[in-house]
Amino acid sequence: MLTQEEIDHRIKTQLAYEFNCEPEDFSGEETLITSAVPHKKRRIFSEKFPFLQMATFGTNAVISADERIHPWLREWVKGKQGFWLFQHEYFFELEEELRRYGVKMAPTHHMFVPKPELMGITTGLKVRWLEQGDIMAYYGREEFPNALCDRFYPERPDVIAVTALDGEKIMGMAGCSADSPEMWQIGIDVCPAYQGMGVGKTLVSLLRDEIFRRGAIPYYGTSLSNIRSRRTALSCGFLPAWIETVSEVRQ
């Protein structure tokens, strides 16, 4: 089992690939601005490489951006603690500047990582495990927009899923995508008729344990306003770890 220190280092190492910096830069006091450079080991969530991305682990911020906006960014971060840059008032300022380049900010992603210990959960639910080859049959089903990607992506494949069954009817599904070889992101969907019964907590807990057993780091992302999802994360031993956000092309 990984230690907490190993988990923290591996996550910061992964983000360092993506933000063109060193892992220890996420633990500093001063906000760092770097040039946006695509790394072959980065997590890929969009076909277009981002004009700007920003992350904080609760102290400073690291901002990777196109060099055209660096002079403005250097003025923008002056006198501000890095983690406050994610507040709405500062986001609004950043958004206004980004419009000049035809991009805008996507919502912030609040990322959770569990304590490095198995929950060892037991359940009376009937569950069925799906390996990567089994998952292919579930693509395109509207019940699972969070548990699975909309299709197979070789750069971040869905690798494991677990379902809870009422007879042969699926009550809910938790799945994970291998966003990097060491970081597997969990998503969960519970069908409306079975919400409020603890199905989501059970499935996420089972999946987080299995990811640990396979030597990867389970992580969970949600938005600030998705209270139900945040509660699921907390109830399954996940704790807030970092916040990240990225620009996207304006439509």
Image (cartoon, rainbow, N blue to C red):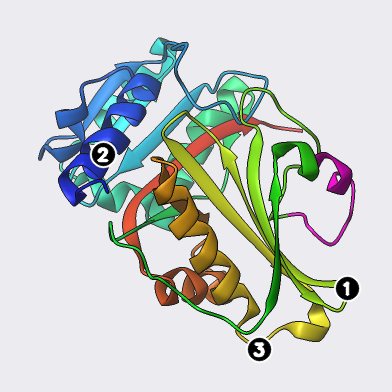
Residue range (magenta): 136-145
Mark with earlier residue (2, 1): 2
Q: Is residue 71 above or below residue 24?
A: above
Quarter location, residue 54:
top left
Mark with earlier residue (3, 2): 2
Which of 54 and 171 lies nearest the eye of the viewer?
Answer: 171
Q: Amino acid at mark 2?
A: Ala
For the residues labelled 3 and 2, say whether their Cβ atoms are less than 8 Å apart. Answer: no
Q: CA distance from mark 3 to mark 2?
A: 39 Å
Determine whether, in the image, residue 9 is placed left or right of residue 47. left
Q: Amino acid at mark 3?
A: Met
Q: Give x and y (percent) for residue 12.
A: 27, 34
Q: Give x and y (percent) for residue 67.
A: 39, 11
Which image quadrant: the C terminus? top right
Q: Give x and y (percent) for residue 101.
A: 58, 21
Of all residues, the one furthest to the left in this rendering is 29
Q: Give x and y (percent) for residue 10.
A: 28, 34
Q: What residue would you read off at disc 1?
A: 169
Q: Main secondary structure of the magenta part?
A: loop
User: Residue 61 got which mark?
Assistant: 2
Counting other residues with Cα less than 10 Å from the Cα at mark 1, is it few (<14), some (14-19), or many (20 or more)? few
Counting other residues with Cα less than 10 Å from the Cα at mark 2, is it few (<14), some (14-19), or many (20 or more)? many
Which of 72 and 61 lies nearest the eye of the viewer?
Answer: 61
| Residue 109 visible (yes or no) | no
Q: What residue would you read off at disc 3?
A: 197
Q: Amino acid at mark 1?
A: Lys
**In this rendering, the label closer to the viewer, 2 or 1:** 1
Quarter location, residue 50:
top right
